[in-house]
Image (tube, grey):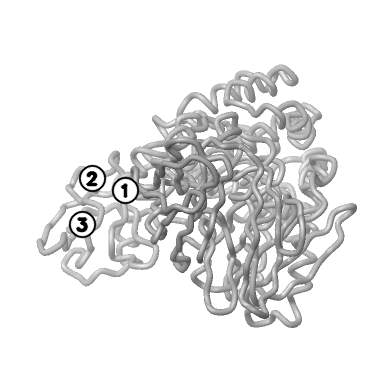
Amino acid sequence: MDVSLRIPDASGTTVLAVPTWVPGAYGFMKYGRDVFDVRARCGTREAQVRRTGWSGFEVEANGDLRLTWSAGAWDPAWGELAGFVDADQGVILATRWLHLPGDSRPCDVVYELPEGWALHHPGGAEEVESWRFRYASFAKMLDTPVVAGRFDRIGREAGAATLEFVFLDTAAGFDTEADRLADAFARVSTEAAAVFGGFPFDRYSFVCSFDRTAHWGLEHAHATMLGLGQEAFVDATAFARAVRVAAHEIFHVWNGCRLKDRALLSPDLRAGSFPDGLWLTEGFTRWYEFVLCARAGVLTPAQVLSNVVNYHRGLRALPAFAHTSARDSSLATFLNHNRYPGAGNATLDYYDLGMLVAFDLDATLRLAGSSLDLEMRAFFEAHAADGFTSESAIRFFAARHPECAEMLRREVETAGSLSAMALLGRLGFVPRIEQRKRLGIVLAEKAVQTVADVHADGPAARAGVAPGDEIVRVDGHPFGLKALKWLVERGRPMRLELARGDRKVEAEVVPEPRPDVAGLRFEGGPDDIARIEAWFGAPSGLKTGEDVPLDHHENFHGVQTLV
């Protein structure tokens, strides 16, 4: 991309910067690495540009300052964060653009595209003239993915709002199934709007790719970028997963894009902003992605409950569960947004933890005759203008429902204090607890011989197994995952032969028992069934005395293999 910028009233030292992160993706990034050939002119004379820090430049100027630069714009891994441009299309974002940090003035952008390219601009900006748009601020521009070049587009009317589906590419089944996908996206969108009493926009765009490199799912106030995978039209599980990611992002329209943690009302795009309420922003949104899909007929209530149990099992298996609160997990987001060796000992995913806090709050409210639907609408109306903190959120829900006060404060501020299993019991479900053997190692998702993480409270850690080790042999036999699990289940001591870089290491490990949820039986009655069906807006299929299958476990951040 070639970019030019005019600042009509520069005075003295003007400092410009490329963002180091974007809200919704909490990791410091080197977007400035792609910016090169920065030049400046003030009036008729050339002005010297000096680099400052890892993402900024400064220039001395008084008067009409004009800068030009180029930016490399092709890195699929950064596609949802910084956009991309290739030979026949692009998604243009301001992440690689210089801006004046802290400047909240409106700005105009003219998009100059190759001949024959089309332009799709989401809502949220004023079209001053053809391909010229006015944004309320740089932050608003940063929040707007603009699609250019070749793409397919279809639309749906949802009440007074228009939903636009922009497809950058296609996949098998697109010709016959794209409308079905758009209909499903529209259903979950309508269900989300029902929670809050209507859409807060006139137009909203789903920018979709099926490319295997598009690992997308990032919210914007008037659009989202979604990576749906090559099997979205031909596989029922992949189709449901695509609708789930759409449900998550459309719920962010309210919870995240307009109702914000107070620290994100005016985010510091250079030094970072550290919110303490992401357990609500992301966790409650994760809960609603399941709820909305059930109400839209994409998931069953039993599948939703299966995920509640499996998310709970996954969190309890982590050593960090015993010492990391939801609030602390939110504050540490720049450290824990991505998994790394040792993450299971030090951090929890606030998406997962917050989802279970939302379930616990929703269940408590429904048992008391209310619902999280009603309370989220009220919370939105009360705090969309001024933002919230963990403390103000706890006080809000506690004031309206004193029966939730102690539970919510404990679950947000105290580690290891979820109430999900107890609340499932009050809803008519009986979990079956069994002692399961474990080593305390997490295997890599693709290279299962490789140890991705080691839990500090498990026998493998005490035996000296380390992240990055490759398991070569088990008891003298070549590594096999099924054989390893078989040996662990029997609790017998085993000898692991490990490759640690160029070294060979041996570890004697004895599996140890740990309580785990092995099943879930429904023992409730007609009132419990009616409550579940009203909650999820679908037939429950529950029958007294029968087990609820626990075979559904979907997590966009990956389901890890814990041995």
Which mark is nearer the camera, 1 or 3? 1
Q: Left or right: 40 with respect to 504?
A: right
Residue type beneath disc 1: Gly
Pick the residue in front: 387 or 250: 387
Image point 57% across, 31% down: which residue?
Answer: 419
Image point 28% across, 41% down: which residue?
Answer: 456
Pick the residue in front: 151 or 510: 151
Q: Please determine whether, in this image, residue 277 is positioned above or below residue 563.
A: above
Image point 58% across, 21% down: which residue?
Answer: 391
The kind of secondary structure element at disc 1 is loop
- The residue identified by callout 1 is 440
The answer to whether mark 2 and mark 1 are in CB contact below 8 A is yes
Residue 76's spot in the image, x, y percent? 47, 67
Distance from the alpha carbon under mark 2 to that under mark 1: 7 Å
* Quarter in which the C terminus is drawn: bottom left
Q: Residues within 10 Å of mark 1 (few under 14, many from 20)?
A: many
- The residue identified by callout 2 is 461
Residue 374's spot in the image, x, y percent? 79, 33
Q: Residues within 10 Å of mark 2 (few under 14, many from 20)?
A: some
- The residue identified by callout 3 is 494
Image point 78% across, 71% down: which residue?
Answer: 154
Distance from the alpha carbon under mark 1 to that under mark 3: 14 Å
N-term mark: 1 or 3: 1
Residue 376's spot in the image, x, y percent? 74, 34
Which mark is nearer the camera, 3 or 2? 2
Q: Quadrant of residue 258?
A: top right
